[in-house]
Amino acid sequence: MQNYKIFTDATCDLTPQQVEECDVRVMPMEVVIGGQSFLHYPDEREMSLKEFYTRLRGGETATTVAISMGTWEQVLEEDLKNGSDLLLVIFSSALSSTYNNAKMAADELKEKYPERKIVIVDTLCESLGVGMLTRMASKWRAEGKTIEENATLLERIKLKIHHWFTVDDLGHLRRGGRISMATAIVGQALGIKPILHMDGEGRLVAVGKVRGRKHAIKEIINRMEALAEEPANQDVFIIHADCPEDGEALRQELLSRIPVKSVTINQLGPLAGAHAGPGTLAVFFIGKHRASLNF
């Protein structure tokens, strides 16, 4: 196995067991809810996801804070001092300054440690899209790929990682500025459920809408059916925001229609959950290049 370390951030939504299996380091990220600040780690040590979503359902609002340049610099320098090269797999630069802050920190540290390598990948993904790429990076490192080869493979596949979402409560998208108040009010009254995906520029965009939760679940799988490449060879991921029954319903719909290698269900963390809200559902898979799609 190549001797370099892999970092990602807490948006990856990997479980502690998955993080351990991958042998990667996950940078915690700050969330503020109801005026209370906490750092989100995969093991939920400062606030459980159950408490977080219960508070959102109770009417509290949440915001997220990017990882600062100073924090990146401090953490990365520890490993550089110990002689490690570093591969950073970071969530979409279109959604946060976390990537740009990591890049500025890396530029500073490269001058201080010119013999070391720091390679950063802007995944243009979020949530388990980042998690999937982190798992791939770990696998390729174990197979002996150099840090440069690993980064090249990640760059080639990152825009083939599909994220198809639906949300249960349009109010959270409205508070995040994604839709207007009028759209949210009318949509809620009519039971409208938006269908969203991550586009070729790493932005979460609405591409359709249906009436009712069951139709939303079917529509997500319709999109996967149309876009997935060789699904029978894929490990597919589903994520839910405190709605495990709906996560299972999505899994059953998927398995009844599309043969896949495996399906893993994780929980949506507070970084994306703060903006999408409880009841969010998503499926992640490898498919047609996202930049080539027009909706």
Image (cartoon, rainbow, N blue to C red):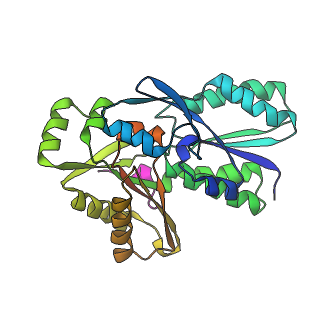
Query: Residue at 74% of width from left, 27% of height from top?
Result: 74
Asked if residue 92 is among those painted magenta in the image, a careful observer would answer: no
Q: Quadrant of the N terminus?
A: bottom right
Percent across and percent down for residue 223 are 33, 61
Chain part drawn in magenta? 285-295
Query: Residue at 39% of width from left, 50% of height from top?
Result: 242
Q: Nearer the viewer, residue 82 or 200?
A: 82
Percent across and percent down for residue 127 are 49, 47
For residue 184, above or below residue 232: above
Left/right of residue 139 with respect to residue 184 in the rendered view = right
For residue 149, above or below residue 176: below
Percent across and percent down for residue 201 are 45, 41
Percent across and percent down for residue 164 are 37, 54
Query: Residue at 35% of width from left, 64% of height from top?
Result: 250
Camera sees residue 88: yes
For residue 169, above or below residue 290: above
Q: Nearer the viewer, residue 226 or 139?
A: 139
Camera sees residue 153: no
